[in-house]
Image (spheres, coloured by chain):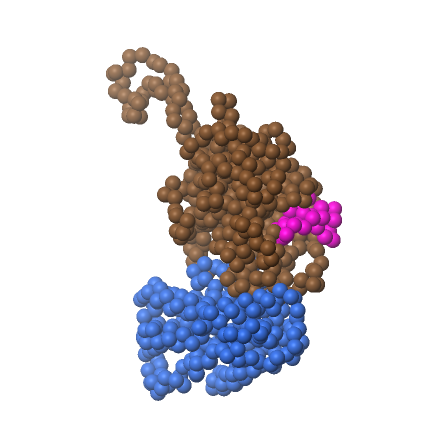
Chain colours: A blue, B brown
Amino acid sequence: MGEEEGLHQTQLLDTMFVRGLKRKCFDGEEDIEGTLAGIKAIPSYNLQRQSLLDMSLVKLQLCHMLVEPNLCRSVLIANTVRQIQEEMTQDGTWQMVNTQSTGQASLDRLVSTDILCRSSREQAEGKLVPDYSTFNKDFESDQAQDSSETMSTASSVQAPRNLQSNVWEMENPQENKGSFQKSLDQIFETLENKSPNSVEDLFSEVDNSYYDLDTMLTGMMSNSKMGHCDGLETFSSPTTTTSSSNCKSDLNELDHIVEILVES
Amino acid sequence: MELHRRCESNPKPSGETGGSSLFPKRPGIARAAAMQASPQCPTNLPQPSSEEVTSGADIISTVEFNHTGELLATGDKGGRVVIFQREPESKNEPYNQGEYNVYSTFQSHEPEFDYLKSLEIEEKINKIKWLPQQNAAHSLLSTNDKTIKLWKITERDKRPEGYNLKDEEGKLKDLSTVTSLQVPVLKPMDLMVEVTPRRIFANGHTYHVNSISVNSDCETYMSADDLRINLWHLAITDRSFNIVDIKPANMEDLTEVITASEFHPHHCNLFVYSSSKGSLRLCDMRASALCDKHSKLYEEPEDPSNRSFFSEIISSVSDVKFSHSGRYMLTRDYLTVKVWDLNMETKPVETYQVHDYLRSKLCSLYENDCIFDKFECAWNGSDSVIMTGAYNNFFRMFDRNTKRDVTLEASRESSKPRAVLKPRRVCVGGKRRKDDISVDSLDFTKKILHTAWHPTENIIAIAATNNLYIFQDKVNSEMH
């Protein structure tokens, strides 16, 4: 389902973008599932622009882990994202206050190839880069809400588990990276198919032991969809549509939670 | 002139020769002229079937003729370089002139690992440039993302025989058996081509090297990565001079990268570099040591009617080439090739549409990353025809004088040995003729990114994924 709709949507986006029109009448948010399937109506400009933004952010994330990504491509995609963001700012559809920090942070990170690739390595090794601590803790807190075991035993087994995870990494850094890579590949493949629902299925296939390792978790999470709320919403509830208002409010809430966590 | 494809294994004369124009008189009508091309794989692997997945290491990543056109070098993704040599023309078989056969194969670059960044450095050969020949040996520069190497190619076809102290196998003779002295003589042996690395220019680049260009002074060359251009002396490997640096103080402000660069063919102080925003900068090294400030900026204002979110991406210049005369520059962006006059900075003098039918597909091409494909472009020897590759194994030629253009296909299925290449057409709806390809059935995995034109004759080399096609015009000696 996701794949076909994604293709259909892209074809419509092509039709949209070829005219070079920046404005169409605002039809309001359309239900993707319902109307796109059979109707030839072009989705609203906002929705398409949002689609392009999502696609671009995913592209920036999905850089190869082993080889340095193409800087030219990253810069061109980042410029496209900036262009969309600027336009959305002018429209007033981009809420500046809280999201700009995260949007900017993700954008800045994505432009800098060094940081992007370094981050994936460091997170695989269990170091939290300060820029990403925001999102890392988001996912940890979300995960904590869902799996009670983590929360209840957090305090007591925190120290030995960290030690264990560190030791585990030192002994098998290669295996760690290999399995990590495999999980990432699965994630990338899924994300490229644009079917967020299957992300949950994906995680059910992954060995549960990974969830016990903070480092593995943060590594995987931070390399999946960071830019928008799809990843976040996967844990809370399966959703297929990403309407911008939901996304922004979720991010706002998480920022709030993060601030509390950081301060404590 | 018509383009023909030659069969490597069975050269025989085929009959009449073609007409006098570059393009067939009427599209769709094949004239049986004796143009041949050989489909030559850079390695001796068995020929893959048309549906077979190409093995990654064999994908050709660069093609370059040397200054006489006698040698043709190809680099591939596996770090290998294969050099082809043109057979000398034989008076006995006038139609068997100039077939290219494998001359030498060597491993130029190996995969490396950057321990500091925990990243692999690909061994893929990004560019090869030949040095002008100064003695019996040939030299070329080959580069991957980080390291440039100078290779010397020499021939050995004689060896000395008749030593006094050593026997034929090289073992020392028993001196008691030596009764007389002899002078060693040179005897012919099977031709052996030796390739040795003479210089390794390492650690000059933080970012990925995208171009190298040898200066007309034959002493220096430059290498360009995404953000910097370095000037090297061919004999000095531990030092290079940085001549262009567009890295912003804060990497978060980065919006533009260098995509290609080249030295002027005659003026050793001039070079040009292109950017991802579609601009060209001509720099004069006499002006200052660091040429961040350009002498001339070539930029065409954007067409407002075609504006979209992809405008910048498709304006990114993927290749820039000076004409042989040095008067013009040729640039390739995603949908067009443009000819610029060095004296006019405001707009190109000529613009040719390569595949404008893709303009309505930009979003799909963005999604599958095809929009980032970097096509190269080439001039012919007299600067009258320009050539560039496209998708579906098509390549395009534009005659600057007659303003005619042609689309041809480089594939085994469509080109039988010694057949004339049939012009192809992509239809965009409306009337569809026989043999037309519709836009939606184009194969975007079959892209011709790398092409090269012989410096003087009408011989072209086309790299189609892991196959190399060489097309030539039989009648070339009589015209141009």
The answer to if B333 sits in the magenta stretch is yes
The image quadrant where one finds the N terminus of chain B is: top right
Q: Residue furthest top?
A: B180
Residue A129 position, x and y percent, is 48, 72
Q: Residue at 48%, 25% (x, y): give it.
A: B93
Q: Residue at 42%, 69% (x, y): give it.
A: A190
Q: Answer whether residue B220 is visible to the viewer in this image.
A: no
The image quadrant where one finds the C terminus of chain B is: top right
Residue B117 position, x and y percent, is 46, 60
- The magenta region covers B328-353
Q: Quadrant of residue A171?
A: bottom left
The answer to if B344 sits in the magenta stretch is yes
Q: Answer whether residue A23 is visible to the viewer in this image.
A: yes
Q: Nearer the viewer, residue B113 or B313?
A: B313
Residue B473 position, x and y percent, is 56, 34
Residue A156 position, x and y percent, is 33, 85
In the image, is residue B178 above or below residue B269? above
In the image, is residue A158 above or below residue B319? below
Q: Nearer the viewer, residue A2 or A40?
A: A40
Q: Residue at 57%, 62% (x, y): give it.
A: B361
